[in-house]
Image: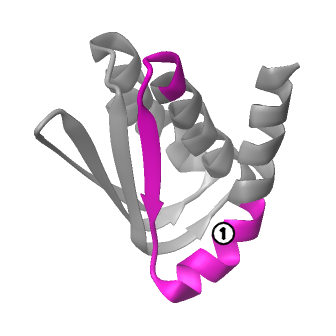
Amino acid sequence: MLDIDITSKRGILFITLRGSFTEKMVSKFQQEVTLFIQKIGIKNTIFNLSELNSISQKGLNELIKCYKLTIKNHGETTIWASPQTYLKLNKTILNKITTINMLSLS
């Protein structure tokens, strides 16, 4: 189960994810977050993953898709996480973002 809390303040979209971001939850995330960012043209997003128990590879890919959308909109994406979550996700996310940035430069 994935709970998604979305708020907006001063042009920044705050997204808090709670529970497990499994492959089954990707379509829910796409409908509630990704399409919203895409349709509205959101520039800046902050993802709070501190209450996220687990995330699948497809979930990570969807976060990266949101990152790419905000970059396309000339904005930024920030990811907040608890130290435990950060340690689990940091290496994977940074490797993927680095790869995306390298491909963008090519």
Q: Nearer the viewer, residue 49 or 76?
A: 76
Q: Residue shown at 45%/43% (left/top)? A: 77
On the image, the x and y values in percent for residue 36 come to 32, 23
Residue appearing at x 77%, y 34% in the figure:
100
Can you say which quadrant of the picture contains the C terminus?
A: top right
* Figure quadrant of residue 90: bottom right
Q: Report the side of 18 relative to 83 (left or right).
A: left
The residue at the far front in this view is 105
Image height of 61 relative to 83, above or below:
above
Label 1: few (<14), some (14–19) or many (≥20) C-alpha neighbours in 10 Å: some
Res. 10 image quadrant: top left
In percent of width and height, residue 57 lies at: 73, 52
| Dot 1 amino acid type | Leu
Coordinates of residue 83 in the picture (x, y in percent)? 52, 86
> Magenta residues?
71-92
Name the image quarter holding the N terminus: bottom left
* Vertical order, 35 against 79 (above or below): above
Write the residue at 44% across / 37% down.
76
Q: Is residue 99 magenta?
A: no
